[in-house]
Amino acid sequence: MRKILVTGALGQIGSELVLRLREVYGKDNIIASNRRIKEGHMNLIESGPFEIVDINNMDQMSKVVGKYKVDTIINLAAILSAKGEKDPSSCWNINMNGLINVLELGRAKDLQIFNPSSIAAFGSSTPPDKTPQDTIQRPTTMYGVTKVAGELLCDYYFKKYGVDTRGVRFPGLISYETLPGGGTTDYAVHIFYKAIQHKRYTSYIDKGTYMDMMYMPDALEAIIKLIEADPSRLEHRNAFNVTAMSFEPEELAASIRKHIPDFELDYDVDPVRQEIAESWPNSLDDSVAREEWDWNPKYDLDTMVKDMLEKLKDKLGEI
Ligand code: NAD
Ligand code: AKB
């Protein structure tokens, strides 16, 4: 059975991925880690092995890999787009120097490495509609720079050293368990909290701004499917375009109104995040992921909205 170390496990993806991986591979085979303990995660921390690991601290990470005989690292430790623009040097340090540590460990100990990229790896000179798998990548945020460099670095470690690196370009992820960690697509999560609590949301992203999105259950299955994919089918290894839906704020609001008819949406656009959003694609072409490892998301806009509202109402009702 695999032994998987998940870094950055107390973030938006990790807090759900760890529990899903524990169902699939057994709780003792999934080592959750984060550089610090964060409030509200005691369930996850107590549901199996947990270690403090800072990916910028090679000794610490290497000891944990040795202690549990880890054979796979899923590297989720990172700084996202909006936070990255506030502190570009930390964004570079964690997303690049941390990733190099992960890849060096992969090389030294023959580990499989999954490292997610993002739609942020594209920029305004990228074809914005049905953005192809292989195309122009000139991102204008520090986060995007680290994501495209990370994609290349992962390809380099595979080609040069034979490290089994894999990854996808995730779009904005929508989930109810843990709030997003400071990205541009976060509005598409916040809107659900405000819709349930106040029947009203003020969006910092302007109407008409399309971005790709995906519901968390599909994102978790993408990770598991790709780490298990037959390597002989993988022409690409890192940075597969994956998407499930593309919408702009008015379309999301219209879908929410099918369940909360008096929900109101207005705008107070944040120029920084709006500029980032406008530099990202409107919609991705994910046919290569579908061909090479049978990527096939289950949730579209309406099914995601229905499930989000049900689950979040339960969660907020419990508080
Ligand atoms: P997040 O910000 O919610 O969580 C990141 C976690 O990493 C946090 O718990 C943080 O404490 C931890 N961390 C930060 N620096 C660390 C370090 N040096 N060592 C160890 N832990 C550290 O992020 P997320 O949304 O879960 O994203 C995970 C990965 O997926 C990132 O690489 C991100 O770029 C990528 N991604 C996410 C989305 C999304 O919408 N959530 C979309 C595209 C790509
Ligand atoms: C962000 O908005 O920064 C992330 C991402 C798409 O990478 N959600």
Image (cartoon, rainbow, N blue to C red):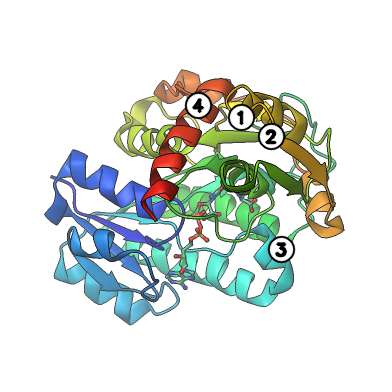
Q: CA distance from mark 1 to mark 3?
A: 38 Å
Place of residue 275 in the rendered image (x, y in percent of width and height, measured from the top left): 84, 51
- Give the residue displayed 58% in from the left and 65% down from the top: 79
Q: From the Cβ of disc 3, is ligand 2 less than 8 Å away?
A: no
Kindly identify which residue carries mark 2: 263
Mark 4 or 3, nearer chain start: 3
- Which of labels 4 and 2 is toward the front? 2
Relative to 172, 280 lies left or right: right
Kindly identify which residue carries mark 1: 260
- Give the residue displayed 43% in from the left and 30% down from the top: 234
Kindly identify which residue carries mark 3: 142
Relative to 279, 180 lies left or right: left
Mark 4 or 1, nearer chain start: 1
- Which of labels 2 and 3 is toward the front? 2
Near mark 1 (Cα within 10 A), the count class, few <14, some 14-19 or many ≥20, is: some
Near mark 4 (Cα within 10 A), the count class, few <14, some 14-19 or many ≥20, is: some
